[in-house]
Image (cartoon, helix red, strand yellow):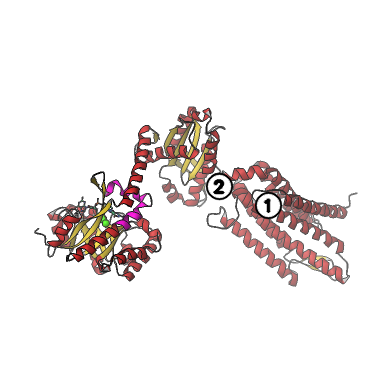
C-alpha cells in the first residue's frame, strides 16, 4: 500500500528542488522583459522555500525539544506568509502576461480587481501575523501537534479568493494568450482548489501546497517556452483590443518595403462615426468593450496575410489586398455589434458606421510611416466631406498636402523675416462717438500682397507657430505704441489676441510682461484677448493666467463670447475685465430675439465686467445695442481694421461723425 505520508513528503522535496533548480537555470537565461524575469524568479524561489518549510514542518512535528519547537513555529509561519506572497506574485505575472505591465496607474486594465488582490494580500499577511499571538489560524497543543484555529479556513480562503479574481481577468482577456497559456495560468486556481477540498476531508495532508508547487512549475515551463514570441507580440499589440498597434503595422509595412507584392495592397485608415455618442450613452467602459468587440469582428473579415490595427481612440488601420478592399469597405458602411452592457447587465447592440481614407499602394519605395500619412490624409479629407464615406487618395490630395507643406514653410520663414504685422480695428464709445480703444489684428505681407488671418491662422493653430505669431504681434504693437507716444499721440487701450494654445506655457503672463516691459510703454495700455472655453481643466488654467496678468498690471478680455455654447459660469469664475460679444450674437439683434443678450448684459453689469459688441455693421444694430446698454462697439460700421498709417490718422482725429 502507498504510504501517503512518505509520498507527500517526497513530493514536497522533489518540487522544492525543482523550483530552486529552475530558478537557477532561469536566472542565467535571458528575458527581454525584466519585470517578468524578476517575477518568475521570485515565484519559483518563494515557492521553493514554502515547500521546504512545509517539509521541515513534518520533520519536526510532535517533537518537544525546545529548539525543534522554535523551528517548527518559524517554518509553519513561513508557509502561511509565503502562500499569501505567492498570490501577489501570481497576480503580477498574469498582469505582465496579459498587459505587458504591472502597475496601478489609472489606465491599467482591470485596475480595481488588481487593487482588490492587493488588499487581500495585505489582509492575509496581517491575519497570519495576528494568528501568531492568538491562534486564530492555527496553534500547537501541549504535545506540539498542529491544531486548526477557528479561522483556519481563511488561510486558504483568501489566496483562493484572490486566485478567483485573477482568473476572472484571465478569462476576460483570454483572446490575448493561447489556450495552453490560459490553462496553465488558471491551474493556479483549479489545482489548489481541488487540493484544498481534498484537504478539508483528509485533515493533516499538504495536498494544497503540493498543488501550488505543481502550478508554479507548470507556469515556469510554459513561460520558458513562450517567452520570446510573446514579448515580441506584446510590443506590437494594442492592449485594449488585442489588434496590432502602430508599431506593429508600420513594421509590417516596412518588412514589405521594396517588394513587388506590397503593390497588391491597399491601406484603409478609418474612424467610427459619432463614437462619442456610444460612450455617452453606455459609458466609457462599455465603449471600450464595443471597440474591442468591433476589432474582433473586423479581424474575422480579413485574411491571414492582411493586418488590422488600432491607431488610437476610434481610429483603425487595415492593410488588405486590393482584391478584398470592396468587401472590407462594405462592412465598414454599417455593422451591428452585440455587446454585454456591464453597467446595466444586459445584452445590447450598437450600429457602427465608419469613414475611411484609402491609399492604393502604388510604389514600392515608401516607408511605412509615409504610407500611413497618405491614408491618414485621405481620411482627413473624408471627414471634411459630409456625404462621402470613403475617400481615395488622389493626386489632388497629394498636391494639397504638398501645397500645405509649402505654405507652412513660407509662414515659418515669414515669422522670422518680419512679414507679420499688426493692423488696428478701432473700438468706439457710442455715447460720445469717440475712439476708445483698438484691437490689433495680424496681417501677412507676402508675395507683394496682404494676406488675411483666415489663410494662415488655422495652419498656425495646428502647429506651434501661433505662439510665435502672438508674441511677434505683441512686440509690433508695443513698438507702435512707443512710437505714437513719442509723436505726442494720445494712445487708447490696445488689445492683443493670444491663442489658447499659449496656455500650456505656465509662465505665460511673465513672458507677456517681459515683452511689454522691454518696450518701456505703460502696461495699462495693453489688454489681452483670449477666447472662452467650457472645459473645466482649462477654466482653472485660464483663471490663474488672468490673475497673474492682473497682478502684473494688465487688463484681460474674453473673446468671442457666445460662440462656443457659452457658459455664463465662466464669467463668474474667471475675473475678466471685458467681455466681447461675438458677431453671431450681434447678428441676432435684428431677429428681435434679445432674451439671451439681455441676460448677458445684465449679468456683466452685475459683476462689473465691461462689454464690447463685435462685428457691428449696421446703424440699426447700433441703436438696439445702445438701447440694451452696450457702450462700446467694434465693427465695420465705424471702421475696418486699419493699416498703421491709417490708424495714426484715426488716432489724431478720434471723433466719428456718425
Ligand atoms: P477675432 O479676434 O474675433 O477678430 C475679429 C475679426 O472680425 C477680425 O477678422 C475682424 O476684421 C472681423 N470683423 C470686425 N468687424 C467686423 C464686421 O463688422 N463684420 C465682419 N464681417 N467682420 C468683422 P480678421 O482680422 O480676419 O481676424 C480673424 C481672426 O483671426 C480673429 O478673430 C482672431 O481670432 C484671429 N487673429 C487675427 N490676428 C491674430 C493674432 O495676432 N493672434 C491670434 N491668436 N489670432 C489672431
Ligand atoms: Ca479678438
Ligand atoms: Ca472676436
Give the residue drawn at x 35%, y 42%: 406
Give the residue drawn at x 67%, y 48%: 31
Residue 465 painted magenta: yes
The answer, for residue 491, to whether it is visible in the render is no
- Of the numbered discs in the image, which one, if any, rests on residue 239? 2
Q: Which residue is mark 1?
A: 37
Could you tell me what secondary structure mostly forms the magenta stretch? helix
Q: What are the residue bounds of the magenta stretch?
A: 453-472
Is 384 situated left or right of 348 in this image?
left
State which mark lies toward you, 2 or 1: 1
Q: Residues within 10 Å of mark 1 (few under 14, many from 20)?
A: many
342 or 544: nearer the eye? 544
Above or below, 345 relative to 69: above
Is 485 situated left or right of 210 in this image?
left
Above or below, 317 relative to 94: above
Numbered disc 2: secondary structure: loop
* Real-space CA distance between mark 2 and mark 1, rounded to the nearest whole angstrom: 21 Å
Q: Residue furthest right?
A: 1
Amino acid at each position: 500500500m502507498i504510504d501517503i505520508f512518505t509520498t507527500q513528503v517526497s513530493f514536497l522535496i522533489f518540487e522544492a528542488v525543482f523550483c530552486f533548480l529552475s530558478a537557477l537555470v532561469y536566472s542565467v537565461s535571458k528575458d527581454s522583459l525584466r519585470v517578468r524575469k524578476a517575477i518568475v524568479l521570485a515565484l519559483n524561489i518563494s515557492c521553493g522555500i514554502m515547500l521546504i518549510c512545509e517539509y521541515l514542518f513534518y520533520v519536526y512535528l510532535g517533537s518537544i525539544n525546545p529548539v525543534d519547537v522554535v523551528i517548527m513555529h518559524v517554518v509553519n509561519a513561513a508557509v502561511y506568509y509565503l502562500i499569501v506572497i505567492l498570490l501577489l506574485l501570481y497576480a503580477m505575472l498574469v498582469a505582465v502576461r496579459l498587459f505587458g505591465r504591472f502597475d496601478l496607474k489609472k489606465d491599467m486594465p482591470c485596475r480595481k480587481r488588481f487593487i482588490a488582490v492587493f488588499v487581500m494580500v495585505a489582509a492575509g499577511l496581517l491575519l497570519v501575523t495576528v494568528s501568531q499571538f492568538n491562534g486564530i489560524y492555527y496553534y500547537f497543543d501541549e504535545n506540539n501537534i498542529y491544531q486548526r484555529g477557528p479561522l483556519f479556513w481563511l488561510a486558504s480562503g483568501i489566496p483562493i479568493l484572490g486566485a478567483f479574481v485573477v482568473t476572472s481577468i484571465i478569462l476576460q482577456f483570454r483572446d490575448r494568450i493561447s489556450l495552453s497559456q490560459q490553462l496553465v495560468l488558471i491551474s493556479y486556481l483549479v489545482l489548489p482548489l481541488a487540493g484544498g477540498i481534498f484537504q478539508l476531508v483528509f485533515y493533516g495532508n499538504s495536498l494544497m501546497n503540493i498543488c501550488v508547487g505543481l502550478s508554479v512549475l507548470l507556469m515556469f515551463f510554459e513561460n520558458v517556452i513562450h517567452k520570446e514570441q510573446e514579448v515580441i507580440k506584446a510590443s506590437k499589440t494594442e492592449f485594449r483590443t488585442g489588434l496590432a498597434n502602430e508599431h506593429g503595422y508600420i513594421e509590417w509595412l516596412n518588412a514589405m518595403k521594396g517588394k513587388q507584392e506590397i503593390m497588391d495592397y491597399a491601406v484603409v485608415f478609418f474612424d467610427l462615426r459619432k463614437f462619442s455618442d456610444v460612450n455617452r450613452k453606455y459609458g466609457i467602459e462599455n465603449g471600450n468593450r464595443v471597440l474591442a468587440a468591433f476589432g474582433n469582428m473586423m479581424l474575422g473579415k480579413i485574411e491571414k496575410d492582411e493586418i488590422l490595427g488600432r491607431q488610437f481612440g476610434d481610429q483603425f488601420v487595415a492593410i488588405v489586398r486590393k482584391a478584398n478592399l470592396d468587401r472590407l469597405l462594405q462592412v465598414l458602411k454599417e455593422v451591428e455589434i452585440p455587446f454585454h452592457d456591464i453597467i446595466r447587465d444586459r445584452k445590447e447592440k450598437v450600429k457602427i458606421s465608419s469613414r475611411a481614407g484609402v491609399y492604393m499602394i502604388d510604389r514600392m519605395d515608401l516607408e511605412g510611416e509615409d504610407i500611413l500619412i497618405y491614408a491618414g490624409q485621405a481620411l482627413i479629407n473624408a471627414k471634411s466631406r459630409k456625404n462621402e464615406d470613403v475617400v481615395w487618395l488622389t493626386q489632388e490630395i497629394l498636391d494639397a498636402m504638398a501645397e500645405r507643406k509649402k505654405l507652412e514653410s513660407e509662414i515659418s520663414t515669414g515669422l522670422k523675416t518680419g512679414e507679420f504685422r499688426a493692423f488696428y480695428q478701432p473700438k468706439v464709445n457710442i455715447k460720445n462717438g469717440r475712439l476708445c480703444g483698438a484691437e490689433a489684428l495680424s496681417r501677412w505681407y507676402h508675395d507683394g500682397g496682404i494676406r488675411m488671418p483666415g489663410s494662415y491662422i488655422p495652419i498656425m493653430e495646428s502647429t506651434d507657430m501661433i505662439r510665435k505669431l502672438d508674441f511677434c504681434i505683441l512686440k509690433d504693437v508695443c513698438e507702435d505704441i512707443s512710437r505714437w507716444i513719442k509723436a505726442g499721440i494720445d494712445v487708447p487701450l490696445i488689445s492683443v489676441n493670444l491663442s489658447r494654445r499659449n496656455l500650456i506655457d505656465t509662465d505665460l503672463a511673465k513672458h507677456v510682461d517681459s515683452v511689454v516691459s522691454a518696450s518701456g510703454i505703460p502696461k495699462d495700455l495693453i489688454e489681452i484677448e483670449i477666447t472662452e472655453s467650457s472645459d473645466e481643466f482649462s477654466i482653472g488654467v485660464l483663471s490663474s493666467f488672468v490673475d497673474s496678468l492682473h497682478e502684473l498690471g494688465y487688463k484681460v478680455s474674453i473673446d468671442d463670447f457666445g460662440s462656443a455654447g457659452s457658459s455664463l459660469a465662466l464669467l463668474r469664475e474667471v475675473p475678466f475685465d471685458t467681455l466681447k460679444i461675438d458677431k453671431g450674437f450681434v447678428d441676432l439683434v435684428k431677429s428681435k430675439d434679445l432674451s439671451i443678450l439681455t441676460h448677458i448684459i445684465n449679468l456683466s453689469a452685475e459683476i462689473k465686467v465691461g462689454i464690447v459688441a463685435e462685428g457691428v455693421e449696421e446703424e440699426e444694430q447700433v441703436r438696439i445695442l445702445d438701447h440694451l446698454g452696450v457702450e462700446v462697439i467694434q465693427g465695420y460700421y465705424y471702421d475696418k481694421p486699419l493699416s498703421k498709417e491709417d490708424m495714426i490718422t484715426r488716432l489724431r482725429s478720434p471723433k466719428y461723425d456718425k
